[in-house]
Image (tube, helix red, strand yellow):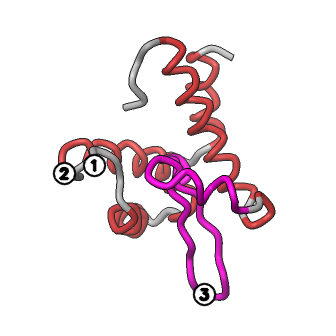
Amino acid sequence: MTSEELLDGYDILFSPELRLAHEAVLTYAAEMEPDGWPSIPTLWRFARCYDVPVGELAALCGVLTYKIGRKTIFCDSRRAPEVVHRTSARNFSRKVLAAYGFYNTAAALSQGEGAAIH
């Protein structure tokens, strides 16, 4: 897969609102978060602001989510990858897994090309 093919899929897989929220949260985090990456409170804030599912937005940033009752559990692959590895994929929705797969593919392509994900 090429970067161009990945970007073409971005428009197909994700709504305009989710794409705008994704761009906005990454831009904000790059300037405002201590490590330059969206925190859980920031993901919640942008998901509410853009009226998009927090799970999908988070997954596009490398953070998987699942529900236990009414509680949302976050598994941050950048800050705590061990939590992601020990959590069963069955816990995650298909949309969350699709967004996370997109994130992982983008990360792999950007490392191969020597570019940054941002």
Q: Residue at x 57, y 16 (%)?
A: 4
Q: Are marks 2 and 1 in contact (CB under 8 Å)?
A: yes
Residue nearest the viewer, comparing 51 with 58: 58
Q: Amino acid at mark 2?
A: Met
Asked if residue 84 is positioned above or below residue 31 in the image, the reply reads below
Distance from Cα at disc 1 to Cα at disc 3: 27 Å
**Tag on residue 70?**
3
**Residue 42, quarter of picture:** bottom left
Q: Is residue 82 left or right of residue 94?
A: left
Q: Which residue is mark 1?
A: 29
The percent position of residue 99, horizontal first and vertical second, equals 62, 47
Q: Is residue 36 left or right of residue 7?
A: left
Q: What is the magenta range?
A: 59-87
Q: Amino acid at mark 1?
A: Ala
**Residue 69, quarter of picture:** bottom right
Q: Is residue 57 visible?
A: no
How many neighbours does mark 1 have within 10 angstroms: few (below 14), some (14-19), or many (20 or more)? some
Q: Residue at x 62, y 30 (%)?
A: 105
